Amino acid sequence: MLKESNFIGQVNNQDADQEKKEKEIFNTTEFRNALDQGSLFQAENFLQNVANNSDQFPQYDERWVDHRQRELFQAFYQAEDWSGAKRLVEATKDERSKDGRKKRLQELSGMKYEEI
């Protein structure tokens, strides 16, 4: 019985690994599909991965990242996920974009940025 139990555990781990791979995003089209499906956390993880590992994603420059962050920021505020939108503001490297998103977040949420 122990051998069968271990086998089932291995199958479950393989299923979990496969599911994780299926949920990973690898390009702009998949990123936008994730936004359309409301998989904002998945899209956020992809952008973090691109920003933190630019050598692995040479096709995506800082401007591309900033534009995708804007799209994700809009998705977060449309869902009224203020903490998600704030995380995105914090991750924004371009200071001009960051300031604009901060102001927009305060306007939309009705809260001071520090309260979010």
Image (cartoon, rainbow, N blue to C red):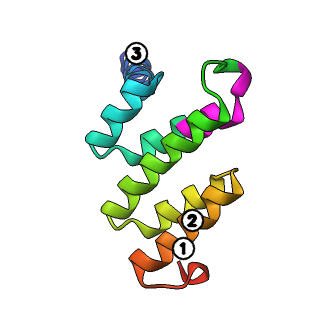
**Where 22 falls versus 68 (above or below)?**
above
Bin the neighbour count of mark 3 within 10 Å (Cα to Cα): few under 14, some 14-19, many 20 and up: few
Which residue is denoted by mark 3 in the rendering?
7
Residue 54 % position (x, y): 70, 27
Between disc 3 and disc 2, whose residue precedes?
A: 3
Residue 99 seen in the figure: yes
Q: Earlier in the sequence, mark 3 or mark 1?
A: 3
Report, in whole angstroms, how far the alpha carbon at label 3 lies from the one at label 2. Answer: 53 Å
Q: Which residues are magenta?
A: 47-55
What amino acid is labelled 1 in the image?
Lys
**Of helix, strand and loop, which one carries label 3?**
helix
> Which residue carries the number 1 mark?
103
Query: Marks 1 and 2, Cα distance to the nearest angstrom?
Result: 5 Å
Q: Position of residue 109 (x, y in %)?
A: 41, 78
Q: Residues within 10 Å of mark 1 (few under 14, many from 20)?
A: few
Are the two marked residues, 1 and 2, in contact with CB atoms closer than 8 angstroms? yes
Q: Decide whether the magenta segment is chiefly helix, strand or loop.
A: helix
Residue at image position (61%, 81%) is 114
Callout 2, which amino acid?
A: Gly
| Nearer mark to the viewer, of 3 and 2 | 2
Q: Is residue 50 magenta?
A: yes
